[in-house]
Structures are given as C-alpha cells and as structure tokens.
C-alpha cells in the first residue's frame, strides 16, 4: 500500500502521524519512516494495522506479503537455463556462481531472500539489509 493511502486510512479513523507517534512513545520522524517502509517496527506496524483495519500484508506487502520478483531478460534466461539442468549439474553450478559473486563483491554473499525494489535498489529496514555493503571500519587514531 502506498504511504499516502496509509496516512489517509489513519486520518479517516481520527489519527495523525504525530498523534500516533505520541501514543506509541516515538518521534514523528520514526513513525514516518515506518509508514514509508524505510524502517521496521513490529509494534508500530501492528498498531497501524489495528487502527486501520488493514492486514500487515495489505499495508506492507514488501515485508509481510508475497511481492512479485521482477527479473530482467538476462536474469530470466539464467533461471530458465538453471531449471533445465539435472539436479547433479545444479549442485555444481551453485558453488561456481557463489564464488563468482564473492569475487565481484569482494565478500561472501549472504544467504536468504534478496528484496529488490522497482528501481533496482535493495529494500531498507533492519530485517532486510541483504545486498548492502558492510560499513567500512573506522581508522583508529594513534
């Protein structure tokens, strides 16, 4: 659901973002980041769901629902080729792809789901930082 629709649903039920933030004991900016899907809070998400009457899947399908994965033509071709391989060949292909990914990215790829946004970036939120490079270590002063 678009953030403006969530805000409208809250207003219809007599809540503003600021009032809801105060009720939850958080800053309005934090409430905004949750509504806009830039950060996550189970407490806030569940409270908004209870107020609006929408399910978590309806409010934030990127977190709670089955969001469709959009593939480029090249990515689709790779998936189709992989599906044609017998199981023994698949077992040989995955380690090679992981090693290639490690070489390109300079680190071991993380396992699990990668959530890709419509613009090709990675979804934000404390639970989904897959694909985001690790922070650079700070230099110690001596």
Image (tube, rainbow, N blue to C red):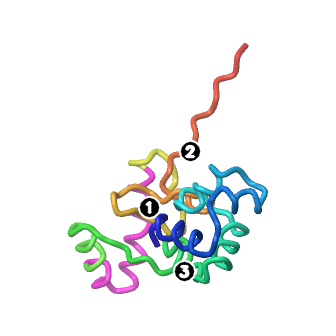
Mark sitting on residue 18: none
Tag 1 or tag 2, which sits nearer the N-term?
A: 1
Separation of residues labelled 2 and 3 (CA atoms): 29 Å
Q: Main secondary structure of the magenta part?
A: helix
Which region is colored magenta?
A: 81-102
Separation of residues labelled 2 and 1 (CA atoms): 18 Å
Q: Disc 3 designates what residue?
A: 57
Viewer-side residue, 119 vs 93: 119
Image height check: is 129 above or below 46?
Answer: above
Image quadrant holding the C terminus, namely top right
Image height check: is 65 above or below 34?
Answer: below
Question: Are the residues tagged 3 and 1 within 8 Å (C-beta)?
Answer: no
* Residue at 51%, 69% in the rendered image: 8
Tag 1 or tag 3, which sits nearer the N-term?
A: 3
Q: Disc 1 designates what residue?
A: 98
* Residue at 58%, 55% in the rendered image: 33
In this rendering, the count of numbered labels is: 3
Which of discs 2 and 1 lies nearer the camera? The answer is 2
The outermost residue toward the top is 142
Residue 18, percent across and down? 66, 56
Relative to 121, 36 lies left or right: right
Residue 34, percent across and down? 60, 60
Question: Are the residues tagged 2 and 3 within 8 Å (C-beta)?
Answer: no
Residue 83 within the segment the image draws in magenta: yes
């Amino acid at each position: 659901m678009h953030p403006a629709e969530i805000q409208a649903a809250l207003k219809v039920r007599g809540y503003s973002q600021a009032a809801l933030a105060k009720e939850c004991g958080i800053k309005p900016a934090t409430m905004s980041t949750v509504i806009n899907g830039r950060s996550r809070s189970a407490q806030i998400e569940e409270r908004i769901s209870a107020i609006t009457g929408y399910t978590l899947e309806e409010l934030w399908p990127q977190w709670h629902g089955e969001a469709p994965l959009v593939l480029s033509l090249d990515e689709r071709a790779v998936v189709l080729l992989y599906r044609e391989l017998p199981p023994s060949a698949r077992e040989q292909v995955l380690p090679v792809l992981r090693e290639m990914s490690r070489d390109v990215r300079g680190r071991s790829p993380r396992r699990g789901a990668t959530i890709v946004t419509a613009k090709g970036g990675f979804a934000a939120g404390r639970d989904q930082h897959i694909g985001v490079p690790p922070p650079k270590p700070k230099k110690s002063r001596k």
